[in-house]
Image (cartoon, helix red, strand yellow):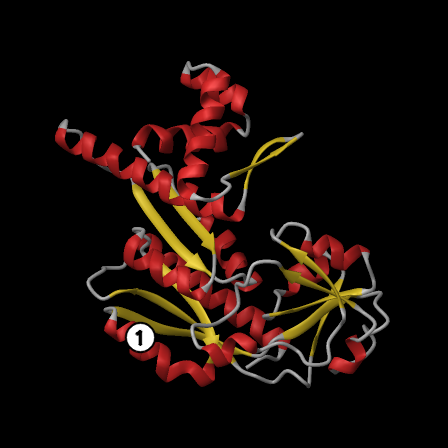
Amino acid sequence: MNMLQLKYAVEVAHYGSINKAAEALYIAQPNLSRYIRELEEELGITIFRRTYRGMIPTPDGETFLCYARQIQNQIDDIEKLYKGEKLHKQRFSISVPRASYIADAFVQFSRHIQVEPTEIYYMETNTRKAIQNLLDANYHLGIIRYAVDDDDYFKRVLEEKGIVCQLVTDFTYVVILSENSPLASKDEIFYSDLADMIEIAHGDPFVPSMMPASQTDIPPNGSERSIFLFERGGQFDLLCENEQTYMMVSPIPEKLLKRYRLVQRPCLDRQRVYRDVLIYQKEYELTQLDRQFIGELAASKRRTLRISGAI
């Protein structure tokens, strides 16, 4: 693998098309296709899915491209530094679990971005990857999620790696479903109520943990029918349009529930408490952008968890 291959992959992702990327790079389309194919073979992953809509990054591809873009940015910075150019670009980067209250905080945070040159990186990923991004991928912040039972283990691991951790919130999972669902009238839900429903679940394992015991937190009596999503975009549409579906998630902001005509209910069979924790390296000094995001995160947490009645 070389820098040219990284550049080619980033350009294909940017244009979503081999033909358009080839035109921008001034190389022949067959040659660019061959370079991408050789890169995939060398790495042992599929970076792009070839579809009628163009080249779509796979989950492995998204991770690879995130690293590739950061490497390109670092090379650009080095060139500017030694060419005497001053660097004024603000950067904000964070790895987080899939959580609507965190996504809502990020949306509000985006309003703080001013006219100065700014680069923002927001990756939804699992606990292990968030820690790795902090240590190896030049990410400044992370939010990790794990069961409260595992707190001592994670604090020890983070301390050994020189990582500071700050509690964001504790919560229990809730069930979200359409306001027209046959279960919407129930104030409390049990696994047995969900037996005839269709569970919507994320196809990649973004929920906790590094402890083997915590990786088996699977409902024993939930639905036998499942839809696995590998992207966030379709989950609310499915819940809204299909009254037989539900999701088990961290609490959802009220405005999203209203927008998609959803309700959230406690599941009395799933009382395990989870913890979201903000992490960053000990020697790292929080920037103004970091502090603005943390402020929005605290506000979103208060709004969401107060309304949901979660811990």
- Which of the two residues, 305 or 271, is positioned nearer the viewer here? 271
User: Going by the image, does 136 lie left or right of 224?
Assistant: left
Whether residue 291 is visible here, answered yes or no, is no
Q: Secondary structure at mark 1?
A: helix
Residue placed at 35% from the left, 56% from the top? 133
For this view, does 78 lie left or right of residue 129? left
Residue at image point 40% right, 39% down:
42
Above or below, comparing residue 195 to residue 14 in the picture: below
Give me the residue at 73% from left, 53% from top.
237
Type of the residue with mark 1 = Val
Q: Nearer the viewer, residue 116 or 23?
A: 23
Establish if 4 lies above or below 135. Answer: above
Question: Horizontal and vertical percent for residue 29?
Answer: 50, 17
**Residue toward you, 50 or 131:** 50
> Quarter of the image holding residue 11?
top left
Residue 311 shows in this picture:
yes
Q: Quadrant of the C terminus?
A: bottom right
Q: Is residue 291 above or below residue 115?
A: below
**Total labels drawn:** 1
Residue at the spot of label 1: 157
The correct choice, above or below, for 79 with respect to 65 in the image is above
Q: Position of residue 85 (x, y in %)?
A: 17, 29
What residue is rendered at 77% in x and 57% in y?
Answer: 240
Q: Residues within 10 Å of mark 1 (few under 14, many from 20)?
A: few
Residue 204 placement (x, y as % from top left)? 56, 59
Q: Quadrant of the N terminus?
A: top left
**Closer to us: 192 or 291:** 192
Left or right for 94, reference 90: right
